[in-house]
Image (cartoon, helix red, strand yellow):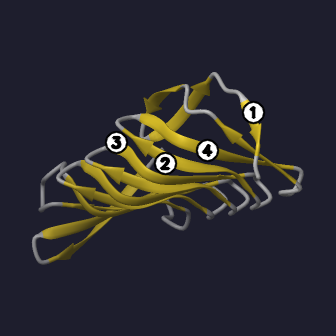
Amino acid sequence: MIFASSVCRSQEVEQRTFYDEEKSQLKEVYTLKEEGSKVLHGPYSDYFENGNLKTSGQYFDNIANGVWEFYYENGQIRMRGNINNGVNEGQWEYYYENGETSMEGEISNKKRQGDWKMYFDNHASTKKVSTKTYVVYVNIIMMISFVYKFHAVP
C-alpha cells in the first residue's frame, strides 16, 4: 500500500509517497506542476524500501529531461546519463554493483555512437565495443542488447 502527502511551493506541489501507513519509509518524492495536476514538473526521486536512493532526475511537463541517475539497492550508482525529451542522449556511464565502471559511451538517436569502452577485472582489461547495436527503452531505464566485436584499447 502507498500513502501520500504534499507540500506546496508557489504553483508547484511536492508529493511524497511512503511504503508504510506511519509515513516513516519514504518511497518517492516528486513535483507536480500545480495543485490537482498529474503533470510531473521538477525534481524526482524514488527510494528502495531500505531507504537508499533508487532513481534521481528531473521532469519537465511530464517528460524526463536532464541528468538521471539510477542506483543499486546497496546505494552504489548503477548508471548515469542525460535524457533529452524522454530519450537517452549523450554520454552514459554504467557501473558494477561495487561502484567500478563497467562501460561508457555516447548515445544519439536511440543508438550507441562511436566506440564504447567496457571494463573488466577492476579495469585491468579494457575493450572497445563497436557500435552495431539496438536499444530497447523500458520505463526510462535503458535495457541494451547488442552485437559486438572486441578491439584492444591502445
Q: Position of residue 2 (x, y in %)?
A: 44, 49
* C-alpha separation, residue under disc 4 versus residue under disc 2: 7 Å
Residue kind at label 2, given as amino acid type: Glu
Which mark is on residue 150? 1
Q: Position of residue 118 (x, y in %)?
A: 72, 45
Residue kind at label 1, given as amino acid type: Phe
| Residue 20 showing in the rendered view | no
Q: Nearer the viewer, residue 58 or 51?
A: 58
Q: Position of residue 115 (x, y in %)?
A: 59, 43
Contact, CB < 8 Å: mark 3 with mark 2? no
**Where is residue 110, by image quadrant?**
top left
Contact, CB < 8 Å: mark 4 with mark 1? no
**Where is residue 54, by image quadrant?**
bottom right
Q: Residues within 10 Å of mark 2 (few under 14, many from 20)?
A: some
Identify the secondary structure beneath mark 1. strand
Residue named by callout 3? 87
Circle nearer the N terminus (4, 3): 3
